[in-house]
Image (tube, coloured by chain):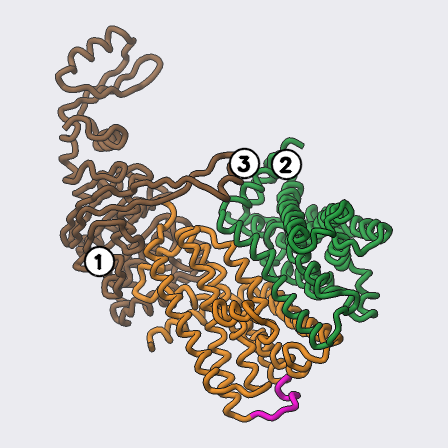
Amino acid sequence: MIKVTELRKTFTSYVKEPGLLGSLQGLFHRREVTKAALKSIDLEINPGEIVGLIGANGAGKTTLVKILAGIVHPTSGTATVMGFKPWERSNDYRKQMCLIMGQKAQVWWDLPALDSFLLLKEIYQIDDRLYKKNLEFLADTLMIKDQLKTPVRKLSLGERMKVELMAALLHQPRVIFLDEPTIGLDISAQKAVREFLRNYQVEFKPITILTSHYMEDIKELCPRIVIIKEGEFVYDGSLSKVQRLLGDNKVLSVTTGEKTFKVTVPRADLARKTTELFSGNDIQDLNIHDPSIEDIIESIMRTGVSTR
Amino acid sequence: MKLWRFIMAMEFRKILAYRSDFWITFLGQTFIQLLIARALWQDVFEARGESTLNGFTLGTMTLYYLIVPVGSKILTGENVGFISREIYDGTFTRYLIYPLSFLEYKTLTYLTHSLFYGLHLVFIFTVYHLVFDPGALGPAAFSNLFLGVGVYLLAALAYVMMATAIELLALWVENIWSLMVMLRFFVFFFGGSFIPLDFFPAWALGLLQYTPFPYMVNLPAKTIMGLLSPEKILLGAVVLIGWTVAFRVTVSLLWKRGQLGYTGAGV
Amino acid sequence: MKRYFLLYLNFLRFSFSKAMEFRLDLTFRILMDIIYYLVNILFFKVIYLHTPLLGGWTEEQMLVFVATYLLIDAINMTVFSTNMWWLPFYINKGDLDYYLIRPVSPLFFLSLREFSASSFVNLLIALGFFAYTLATYSAPFGGLDLLLFVVLIVNGSLIYYCIQMLMILPTFWTHSAKGFIDLFYSLGMAMERPDRIYRGWLRILFTVLLPFALIASFPARIFLEHLDWGTFLHLLGVTAVFWVLVSYVWKKGLANYSSASS
């Protein structure tokens, strides 16, 4: 179980004037800028739950995940994961946790994946039987048995991600942090990774936090989502109910002679807006439908929650 | 020319980017070797019980070790791997599609670092004389200083050509880092960075004059100290230019051959 | 303890299989270190053309000292140097992440992971050179001397490692420790000179604040003159103090670690 209260994190950086003169000035004097990456976050996640964390670049998703994984210390506030303070980094906590970052590799580049796995077995002190069992299970479900003896640098991007997943899950963690696990993968590899994560969740029931830019990942895997915007949560609840955030809106998809576009309008204005459109344009096709989850989330990330 | 100026200004900004780096390098480069070498020679002077050894007093020895460490940075300019690193990770191919010569660009950024340390040398030399020996600070001292820094820059040009020739070997073999370190050992030891060449045995000096090394450290440092006649400086400069041309030709050959065989990293 | 030993065996296995893949590089590196050794010996040969004594030692004694610091240098090159080279990049680019989440001391992992197989060959050469200088050295020495020497050699390597770490760790705050690291390499020369040439405040600098002079010069004294037990214990104490300092700064640094890329 994860419990986070009033968690804050601020970063400090320096700005410098452009030009050679600015650089020279910077040797003696510089201006400090602080940026709040997380502004007072509260969050509770129960065992077996899988939560999707959504937000634009720089919204604070990764910072939150890194604090919970014990990599970054928070500026203030508390967080406990299964009773542990993550940034104290006790071995007992680290043995039950894993972090997978789509953008950073953890397996050794020059060696076959199996070599890396053996080292991880030593690091996590996985006993022989469990190691064998998990290795087989993971290799089977990811369908990557044959590539484990090839140096990792010679694998394709999708195969490499599968190997990363294996490396992270060998010790059967009870808390999983997934940061963009499908980034850069082609459609079929994305599908395979998603499929695997779903099966794993059913089989082992870990707590999982998933961040992703791909709405498909979120829609397929996460019944519950958290939307984060500029360091604050703007939504925390079930995926299916996110529609309510935008109130009672409809989307008009319009095709005219020249172009196709979408207009979001409150239901009350629907008739008026439609007539307006018909009178002003050469309409060839018009659809009225409920906004999709992508539309809603995109609009929340752009403008915040405007209609509650 | 405008592009050149722009590239050099960018490189200067990079040098100044981290201020703690800048100040530490500035102080470290100026004082550490000087202090250690001075301690060593002080001990030697005392063991011998003499005030002059092979034409050096402890004072001129100190000046020598004030000049040489910064001078070494003029020679070695940018870091080891300034070309080979980009060859390994494949980023050097981006220069191949720009309308700009890769080697020209690299030589320019390298010499910007040299120029930077040249200014550093002018600064500390001036401060040294103001503090310890204001009497010697005549026009002659300054003309020697600027002449010497000029010779250092010429030596840097020869050095960058040698370094480029070695760095380009990265087109064939996977790691040349150790070769570059060897080049440094040779230039610094046989050039006179560790011990002034005056202390080497005569037969060794006889051999060394057929290598480029003494012209890269001994010549510019002694020029700054005002110990060389104009003829000697001129002759040294001509030798340096000769070596530069020779290595430039080698670089061209390597570059031509190497590009043909290059398969590219990071498929 | 046993676990860390097993982990280290794994690191060794990794390094040797990697080194075998890059054989030409291996050859170059061995050649480089041989030249480095020669330059160091030549340096003192040239100095002794002009003086009978340096730091109170004769040329014969100086060779024992040179062999001592080359040996310590080789140990550090083999065990720590590759790791120390990469550490600031890891800190700066946020690549520490995967080391921090493992149930193993990250400091152990990051300091010892890359055993340098190519330098290992040079360690053997340095050891050979040391044996040679000692065998030709005229004054007698006993088995106990040799034993104490081994302890102090290891101790010296640890001092070297601690100082190097203290120069790297500012990266957590400054984000580029290039200045400090260059400084460390220039300062490294201080260990390659007999300690008696340092006087006054320079002596305080190199024996107390940045104790480079304690790394090799004092262990060599075991053979060259008398080394009393007080000094011996002092040397071990210095390592302990510096180790505590490194652990403390490391902890502070991690608290400040921001893990680049948002």
Residue at far front of view:
B135
Closest to the camera, between mark 3 and mark 1, is 3
Judging by the rendered image, the residue that carries numbered circle 1 is: A85
Pointer 3 residue = A21
**Residue contact at pointers 2 and 3, CB within 8 angstroms:** no
Specify the segment rendered in magenta.
C133-141
Q: Which mark is residue B100?
A: 2
Q: Nearer the viewer, residue C2 or C107?
A: C107
Where residue A150 sits: x, y (%)? 43, 60
Please name the residue shown 43% across and 66% down the image.
Answer: C111
Kind of residue indicated by mark 1:
Lys
Q: For mark 1, name the chain.
A: A
Helix, strand or loop at label 3? It is: helix
Q: Is residue A30 left or right of residue B198?
A: left
Location of residue A289 with respect to B17 vertically, above or below: above
Is label 2 in contact with label 1 (beta carbons under 8 Å)?
no
Mark 2 → mark 1, Cα distance in angstroms: 54 Å
Q: Observer-nearest residue: A264 or B19?
A: B19
Q: Residue furthest right?
A: B231
- Give the label, 2 or 3, closer to the camera: 3
Rendered colour, chain A = brown
| In-image side of C222 versus B167 (left or right) | left
Magenta run includes residue A108:
no
Q: Is residue C216 above or below residue B108?
A: below
Element type where label 2 sits in the image: loop
Q: Position of residue C100 (x, y in %)?
A: 33, 59
Residue type, mark 3 in image: Leu
Amino acid identity at mark 2: Leu
Residue at the spot x=24%, y=43% of the render?
A: A53
Q: Secondary structure at mark 1?
A: loop
- Residue density around tag 3, few if under 14, some if 14–19, many if 20 or more, within 10 Å: few
Image side of residue A168 versus residue C129, left or right: left
